[in-house]
Amino acid sequence: MQVDAERIRFARARRLAGRLNLLPIFLFGFWSIPAKAFWLIVLGIIPWFEPVPGFAAALPVFLLSFLAGPWVLLLPRSYFEPRPWESDGQLYRRAGVEQFRAIVANGDLVNRFVRARHRDYRVYGPEMEKLVPKSIWNEKRHIAYLCWGFVAAVYAWSIGWHGWAIWLAGANIGANLYPWMLQRYSRARVMRLARIAERRSLFARKPLST
């Protein structure tokens, strides 16, 4: 009965977090929507106020942008294991990942607001075991988006659309590079804490010598 009540409270907190997460998800659109509009413009599908490369010229690069991402599916499982230098998170903290974590979906600001109303709320709650595979999937997704956006930015620069190139590259950093780093930072932290908890558990079960 207590477990059922806990799950009900967690579901209510999760619904509140879901509503709050709409804002950071909306902010992601500031990169993805212009990136998609860029390709529609250069392909000549939607009108623009200056000459565009056109469908025949832009199509090969457009297809290349999509081929730049799926390679991430070939990455071995070992790639997603945090390296020793990632375990303490120092490099990521210096890069500002903790500050970035405050404004993302299920980030510090959202969690703080939800916990003010549901004190025991955790993002994964009783589903904590799903955190690592979810993090790996998110990392794959952001790597693929990062590559797609990189090709678009390079192409924009090559055709002299420097404003577009700067916007696509800069927004890509916030929309995908930092989320990529955040996934690795968070996963390393969770796995480090899990190892500490496991060692404590083993120590607690170890019989004292007489």
Image (cartoon, rainbow, N blue to C red):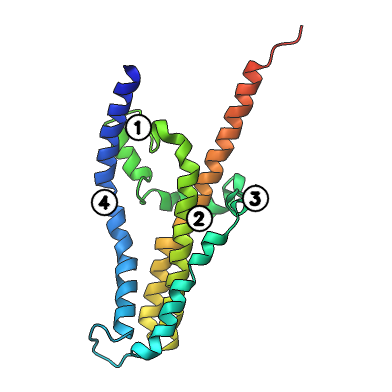
The first of marks 1 and 2 along the sequence is 1
Give me the C-alpha separation between circle 4 and circle 2: 22 Å
Q: Could you give the CA–CA distance between mark 4 and mark 1, rounded to whole angstroms?
A: 18 Å
Horizontally, is 135 left or right of 113 in the view? right
Residue indicated by mark 3: 85
Q: Amino acid at mark 1?
A: Tyr
Label 4 or label 2, whichever comes before in sequence order:
4
Residue 141: x %, y % from top left = 44, 59
Quadrant containing the N terminus is top left
Q: Residues within 10 Å of mark 4 (few under 14, many from 20)?
A: few
Give the amino acid type for the residue marked by disc 3 in the picture: Trp
The residue depicted at 43 percent of the width and 61 percent of the height is 176
Q: Residue furthest bottom?
A: 51
- Which residue is rendered at x = 30% and y = 93% of the image? 51
Contact? badges 3 and 4 (CB < 8 Å): no
Q: Which mark is residue 121?
A: 1
Residue 181's tag is: 2
Nearer to us: label 3 or label 4: 4
Label 3: how many Cα within 10 Å (few below 14, some 14–19, many 20+): few
Residue reaching furthest to the right: 210
Residue 207 rendering spot, x and y as whole percentages? 69, 12
Residue beneath label 4, please? Answer: 22
* Quadrant location of the C terminus in the rendered image: top right
Kind of residue at disc 2: Met
